Image: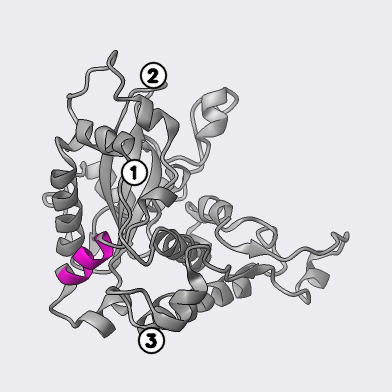
Amino acid sequence: MILARLLRPQQPLRAAQRCTRRAIHVVPPLANYGESFRQNGIPELLSPTGFKTAWIAYQQLMVDKLNERIVGTTLQDALVKDIVIQTAREPAIASTFNYASMAFNNHFFFSAITDKETPMSDELAESLTTSFSSVDIFKADFLATAEAMFGPGFVWLVWHRQPGSLHNGSWKILPTYLAGSPLSDAHYRQQPVDMNTQNTNSAGGLSGADYTRQSQIQNSAGVTGRHSAAGMAGRNRAPGGADVVPVLCVNTWEHVWVPDWGIESKRDFLEAWWRRINWESLEVPVDALKANQPNRTTRGDSGR
């Protein structure tokens, strides 16, 4: 759960009455040494002041702004992840999406950080190797992608499931700009490239249709096969949207790293972050670990 929900009796109140109730989303404690980070910062990554800015103050701001926008609405009792998905295609409430998505993304980032180096499991290393040739190449590609981002956002490690096969998939590196979401059902607002610096010829290989979809407001709600199992599962998914599972991310917003590292030391921050990843805490899809069993071709088109 990204944001904890306060428990209270459910009463049949009208919307106007619900507006007077206390909003339900709060900043959760971090299970990974949260109190230690509050007092001491994250060793060799963020000072106590840097941690306070990037997590305590910023996350509280996102929660407060989100609560202001959902109190008294049908979204009030929804989980933040569900709010992200439900608002991804609603331009009239884009600010609600932005605050919910930032709360989700920022918590995802801090939840995978520890106070010391932890080893990557052999199973995960083997799985990553099938997509990137080696863990070292994966690290180099991931950090290079984050360093090259010209603007704030997040860089994600995601497991990309291929349709039609339970154990057929590959690892991908996915950048999302601003508050863009990696969630499959929110791919209308994935924002995988900075659209302020792109055109149809340079937009990261996007087709003209994809460029239009990501650079202009879209509000088409129709889907194909809505009564089928696949249609129900993908009702909110953008046409052609990939089925991906986010596993790890790094936050490249400047308020996270500039105060402690300086404007010219983004790469140093990224290297330090890599040494503080809690590999043991990552929720790796079971099919990602089974995908490199002997009966599967271990090297194929990774799509990169």
Q: Earlier in the sequence, mark 2 or mark 1?
A: 1
Question: For residue 140: magenta?
Answer: no
Type of residue at label 1?
A: Val
**Residue at disc 2, secondary structure:** loop
Q: Nearer the viewer, residue 280 or 67?
A: 280
User: Which residue does the image show at 52% across and 50% down from the upper left?
Assistant: 85
Q: Quick one: 275 or 290, which is closer to the camera?
A: 275
Rendered view: 282 above or below 80: above
Query: Reading the chain from its start, which is encountered first: label 3 or label 2?
Result: 3
Q: Position of residue 138 (x, y in %)?
A: 18, 45
Disc 1, SS = strand
Do labels 3 and 2 touch, CB within 8 Å? no
* Observer-nearest of 144 and 12: 144
Circle 2: residue type: Ser
Quarter of the image for the N terminus: give it: bottom right
- x then y, percent, for residue 129: 20, 35
Circle 1: is it few (<14), some (14-19), or many (20+) Cα within 10 Å? many
Relative side of 158 to 107, left or right: left
Residue 269 inside the magenta-drawn segment: yes
* Mark number displayed over residue 165: 2
| Residue 95 at x, y percent in the picture | 49, 68
What are the residue bounds of the magenta stretch?
A: 268-274
Disc 3/disc 2 C-alpha distance (Å): 47 Å
Mark 1 against mark 3, which lies toward the viewer? 3
